[in-house]
């Protein structure tokens, strides 16, 4: 018992242990996994790219889809299209990501396979069993097929919120005097929207992205567990069940760093979208 306490540093005062832990953290040493019996830093180095692939793809798609829907709603304000898209976005905005993931698996994986649909998608994992034997083009296609359902889940939930903010921002912009002036000059509507209104409507949405990143990562945890995606979320959930505290602490630290980096990126993009903003 004394040897175990010495190996874990429990025979030293708490302030000394904390300083040593911070020093190890600065070196990228997250300790030893009690469940996997290997260095935690090695686990994270293997798994973190999978989470970044999933969440990054979902964020880019959600931003693109949400902006398109929001602009369409704003340009067709109070029309049937606006009301229909508003109902759809509200539906997905209020839907739990894990429930939507289960429904997509039920329809596009299980039912599609049983019914013999020409297109069906894998329900779990990030690659097929014979992935190593596939030629490079088929490897890419196989990875994309495994990405469709988890990325689709996150995209539907996140793009709904982005669309609602984009609609409000776009409605505020198109009521400005310079937009009326551009239309009075006879500019085509697409040029008024894309060349004048859209860029000014981006700033509030970019601010929303900084706030949406923590929501994205929390949703990624549930989605990774449901789809069996080998990422940080699934690793942390397994570590909690195994009481693997070094992995839990390392996972929390990595997620915190990603959130800070995401907010910093949102601030930089905000300055790019609005040249009037300058950071001293």
Image (cartoon, rainbow, N blue to C red):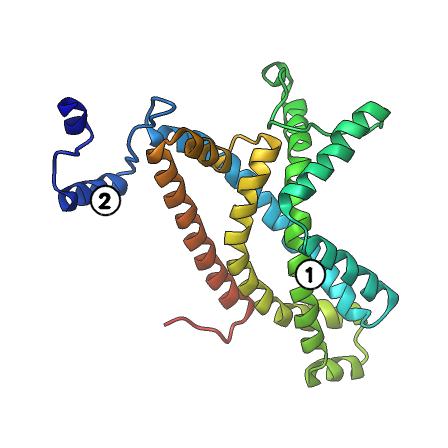
Residue 30 sits in quarter: top left
The crowding category of the residue bearing disc 2, from other C-alpha atoms within 10 Å (few below 14, some 14 to 19, many at least 20), is: few
How many numbered marks, from 0 up? 2
Q: Which residue is drawn at 45% across and 52% down?
A: 259
Q: Where is residue 166 in the image (x, y as percent from the top left)?
A: 67, 65
- In-front residue for pair 64/167: 167
Picture quarter with the C terminus:
bottom left
Going 66% across and 54% down the picture, which residue do you hit?
Answer: 159
Please name whichever residue, 14 or 165, is drawn nearer the observer in this view of the structure. Answer: 14
Q: Is residue 94 above or below residue 110?
A: below
Q: Mark 1 points at which residue?
A: 163
Q: Which residue is drawn at 56% across and 36% down?
A: 224
Name the side, left or right, on which 32 lies relative to 204.
Answer: left
Instruction: Tell me if label 2 and label 1 are in contact, CB under 8 Å.
Output: no
List the residue tagged with mark 2: 22
- The image quadrant where one finds the N terminus is top left
Residue 161: name its quadrant.
Answer: bottom right
Tell me the CA gap for discs 2 and 1: 41 Å
Q: Which mark is residue 218?
A: none
């Amino acid at each position: 018992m004394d040897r175990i306490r010495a190996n874990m540093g429990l025979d030293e005062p708490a302030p000394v242990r904390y300083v040593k832990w911070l020093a190890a953290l600065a070196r990228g040493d997250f300790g030893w996994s009690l469940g996997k019996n290997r260095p935690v830093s090695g686990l994270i180095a293997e798994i973190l790219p999978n989470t970044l692939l999933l969440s990054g793809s979902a964020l880019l798609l959600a931003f693109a889809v949400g902006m398109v829907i929001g602009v369409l709603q704003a340009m067709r304000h109070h029309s049937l299209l606006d009301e229909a898209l508003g109902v759809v976005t509200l539906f997905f905005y209020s839907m739990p990501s894990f429930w939507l993931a289960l429904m997509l698996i039920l329809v596009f994986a299980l039912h599609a396979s049983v019914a013999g649909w020409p297109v069906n998608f894998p329900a779990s994992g990030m690659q097929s069993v014979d992935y190593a034997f596939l030629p490079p083009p088929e490897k890419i296609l196989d990875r994309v097929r495994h990405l469709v359902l988890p990325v689709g889940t996150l995209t539907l939930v996140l793009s709904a919120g982005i669309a609602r903010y984009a609609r409000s921002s776009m409605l505020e912009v198109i009521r400005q005097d310079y937009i009326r002036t551009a239309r009075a000059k006879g500019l085509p509507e697409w040029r008024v929207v894309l060349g004048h209104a859209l860029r000014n409507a981006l700033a509030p949405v970019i601010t929303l992205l900084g706030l949406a990143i923590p929501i994205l990562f929390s949703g990624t945890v549930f989605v990774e567990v449901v789809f069996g995606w080998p990422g940080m979320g699934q690793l942390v959930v397994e570590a909690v069940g195994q009481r693997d505290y070094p992995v839990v602490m390392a996972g929390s630290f990595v997620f915190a760093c990603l959130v800070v980096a995401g907010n910093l990126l949102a601030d930089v993009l905000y300055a790019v979208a609005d040249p009037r903003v300058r950071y001293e």
